[in-house]
Image (cartoon, rainbow, N blue to C red):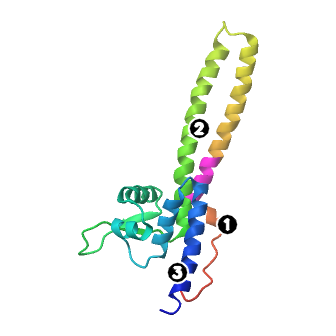
Amino acid sequence: MKGAEKLEQARERVIDTIAQNMNLYGITDSIGRLYGLLYFQEDSMTLDEMKEELGMSKTSMSTSVRTLMELKMVEKVWKKGVRKDLYEAEEDWYQTFIDFFTIKWRAGVSINVSSIEKSLIELNELINDPEVANDIKAAANRDIGKLNDSLLYYDWLNRLVDSFESKEIFNYIPKKQHRNENR
C-alpha cells in the first residue's frame, strides 16, 4: 500500500523518542514504547494484541499496562461484545503531564514533609534536653531553621501542584491551539 511504510516510519520515530524520554519520568523504555504504540492506535487493544505487536511477555505487558494506568496515561475501556480487557492511551498530553506530575510530586512532597516533621520533633527534643551540649543545641537550632525553610518550599510546591490539578496554570501559561485544521 502506497505510503504505509512512510507512515509506519514516521510513527516509529515518535514512538522511539517517547520511549527514550520516558526515563526522565522514571519509566522504562518498554513502557514508553507501549504508550507510543497505544497512542497511535485508532482502536483500543487487548493485552494479547499489545504483546504480539511489541514482542513482550504477557506478564511484562500486564505490568506495563498497570503502570501506565496508575499514571493515568492509559485507561481500560469497554466495548459491547468484547470479553477481553481493552486499553487505550490518554491522548491529551497536557492532561497526561498533569496527572503524572501531580502523582509523582504529591508522593515526593508527602515523604519529604513527613521526614522533616519527624526530624523537627527530634531536634526540638535535643534543644530542650538540659544534658545536651550547647554546641549540639546550636547545630540543632541551625538545622531547625533550614528544615523550616524547606517546609516553605514544599508548601510552594504543593501550591504549584494544586495549580496543575485545578488547571489554573493555564491562566499563566496558556495552551496553544492545534494548528492542523484537518484533525
Residue nearer the viewer, 102 or 82 = 82
Q: Is residue 109 located in the magenta-colored stretch of the structure? A: no
Residue 167 visible? The answer is no
- Find disc 1 in the rendering and name its residue: 173
| Image quadrant in which you'd find residue 94 | bottom right
Residue closer to the observer: 153 or 35: 35
* Secondary structure category for the residue under label 3: helix
Q: What element carries label 1?
A: loop
Q: How crowded is the residue under tag 3: few (<14 C-alpha within 10 Å), some, or many (20+)?
A: few
Q: For residue 112, which numbered disc appears in the image?
A: 2
Segment tinted magenta in the rendering: 157-166
Closest to the observer, 8 or 55: 55
Q: In which quarter of the image is residue 65?
A: bottom left
Residue at (72%, 29%) from the top-left corner?
Answer: 145
Magenta part mainly helix, strand or loop? helix
Mark 3 or mark 2: whose residue is earlier in sequence: 3
Question: What amino acid type is highlighted by mark number 1?
Answer: Ile
Q: Where is residue 7 in the image (x, y as percent from the top left)?
A: 54, 84
Q: Residue placed at 63% from the left, 48% from the top?
A: 157
Label 3 – label 1 distance at C-alpha: 34 Å
Question: For the point 67% across and 16% down, which residue is it?
Answer: 127
In the image, taking residue 114 as reference, residue 76 lies left or right, namely left
Mark 1 neighbour density, 10 Å: few (under 14) some (14–19) many (20 or more) = few
Residue matched to label 3: 8
Distance from the alpha carbon under mark 2 to that under mark 1: 28 Å
Q: Quadrant of residue 97 in the image?
A: bottom right
